[in-house]
Image (cartoon, rainbow, N blue to C red):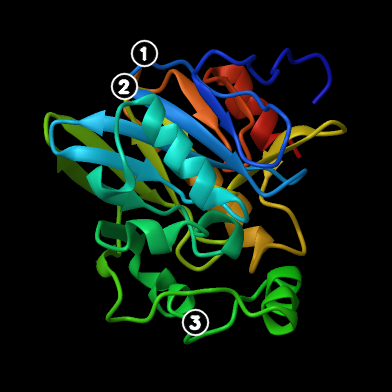
Amino acid sequence: MTGLAVRPLTLVLPLVVAGCGPRPVPLAPRGTAAIALSGGMNTSMTYVARTADGVLAIDLGWWGSADGLRLALRQIGATPADVRHVFLTHSHRDHIGAWPIVEHARFHLAAQERSLFHGEAAHGGWIPRWADRLVPPDLPGPAQVELQAFSRDTTFIIGSDTVYAYLVAGHTPGSAVYLFRGILFLGDAVTWSRAGGFRPAKRGFTDDRRAAVANLAGLWPRLPAGGVRYACTAHARCAAFSPEFVAHVSAP
């Protein structure tokens, strides 16, 4: 969409890099939240934050994610043992990599992702489907993690904080986005490129792009008015949340 000044934010949060260069991340008070980046050029982001009920993590990165997560936790004075809650936007391998070092935590994931997360079903997008066939990912069995699945928009109370979960199926059957402390974690429901800026889920990686676009459009009215300050993709591209951002993402 020509003329819209929707640009990724600059670095303003403690940053941990695991095998990759820096990427933009959102505002947060130093010492209470941190970012780990993993996966090389196709950077995946893990966000960690201290809460009154232990540490919360959103997504778990790709290769190099375990070391990156440990370092990010150190930034907030924590260790993997302190992680109590993990919220996963979806089950693709590049967002679940560090699960073995936090397998004691409670995992939150849309019910439609359960069989994919446990390796009992194949992804629909042809790129992740063939990647999984060529190099099977390390996935937890049903007995290895405690999974709290949700099947509709859900509100979670974590200590004195609130996590809002919204279903936006399409990229995967149970793709979800999370709103936490004013930051909207969009997973891969929104992507970013130099050519197109922020756009809906990418073809090839996505099960049903038409559904992804339609469900993303249905997300915006469900968000609390004035409750979102920043929006971030799962690949560490963030922007101030505004009507211009929504218009840019939604442009044909």
Do labels 2 and 1 touch, CB within 8 Å? yes
Q: What residue type is labelled 2?
A: Thr
Gap in Å between the C-alphas at discs 3 and 1?
37 Å
Measured as percent of width and height from the top left, residue 222 is found at 36, 38
Gap in Å between the C-alphas at discs 2 and 1?
6 Å
Q: What residue type is labelled 3?
A: Gly
Q: Mark 3 = which residue?
A: 119
Q: Left or right: 137 with respect to 229? A: right
Q: Is residue 46 among what the camera can see?
A: yes
Give the crowd class for mark 3: few <14, some 14-19, many >=20 residues within 10 Å: some
At x 47%, y 87%, the residue is 120
Query: Which element carries disc 1, helix, strand or loop?
Result: loop
Query: Which element carries disc 3, helix, strand or loop?
Result: loop
Q: Mark 2 = which residue?
A: 32
Q: Work out whether mark 3 precedes mark 1 in sequence or the reverse, and give the earlier one.
A: 1
Q: Mark 1 = which residue?
A: 29
Gap in Å between the C-alphas at discs 3 and 2?
34 Å
At x 73%, y 53%, the residue is 202
Query: Which element carries disc 2, helix, strand or loop?
Result: loop
**Quadrant (top left, top right, bottom left, bottom right) of the N terminus:** top right
Q: Which residue lies furthest to the right in this view?
A: 195
Q: Left or right: 130 with respect to 14? A: right
